[in-house]
Amino acid sequence: MVERFREMGGVTAVAGLEARGFIFGPPVALALGVPFVPFRKPKKLPGPTVGVDYALEYGTDRIEAHVGALKEGDKVALVDDLLATGGTLAAGMALCKALGAEPAGAAVVVELPALAGRRKLEGMPTFSILAKEGE
């Protein structure tokens, strides 16, 4: 993940999506020498937040970040464990934009290509360590 983001150049922050993005994101941010920003489920962050609602197969959910967690013009690398339908990462992209930042790319550990999640990512460069075909 680190090498992919280094190759992109210009990444100024790493955002990890709750919850397993919190496992993979901080070491990536540390290796890149940039801040780590948690994108959390609702009402888990103290203080004022900005949030984005997104659709699930069975309803809706929301992710939030602190107001001011990213600066205008930040180039953000999004990190999560899984890319399935793409809803969570697409919400992460929208949250970056709501904070005035630019989603620069995404990295996940596992991708399920059969669920076509990349279609929701508007052409954002996305890297997966393992693509699991089938169900």
Image (spheres, rainbow, N blue to C red):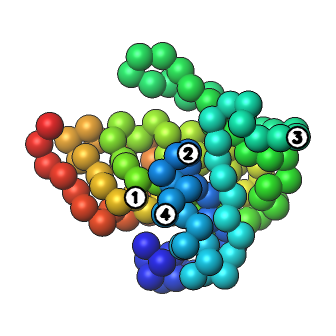
Label 4, residues with CA under 10 Å away: few <14, some 14-19, many ≥20: some
Q: Which of marks 1 and 2 is nearer the N terminus?
A: 2
Q: Which of marks 4 and 2 is nearer the N terminus?
A: 2
Q: In which quarter of the image is residue 9?
A: bottom right
Residue at mark 4 to residue at mark 2: CA–CA distance? 11 Å
The image shows residue 110, relative to residue 48, as above or below, that is below
- Name the residue type under label 4: Phe
Label 2, residues with CA under 10 Å away: few <14, some 14-19, many ≥20: some
> Which label belongs to residue 18?
2
Residue at mark 1 to residue at mark 2: CA–CA distance? 13 Å
Residue receiving disc 4 = 24
Label 4 sits on a secondary structure element that is helix
- Name the residue type under label 1: Val
Relative placement, left or right, of 14 versus 135 is right
Residue at mark 4 to residue at mark 3: CA–CA distance? 25 Å
- Name the residue type under label 3: Gly
Residue receiving disc 1 = 108
Label 3 sits on a secondary structure element that is loop
In which quadrant of the rendered image does the N terminus lie? bottom left
Q: Are dots 4 and 3 in contact, CB under 8 Å?
A: no
Q: Are dots 1 and 3 in contact, CB under 8 Å?
A: no
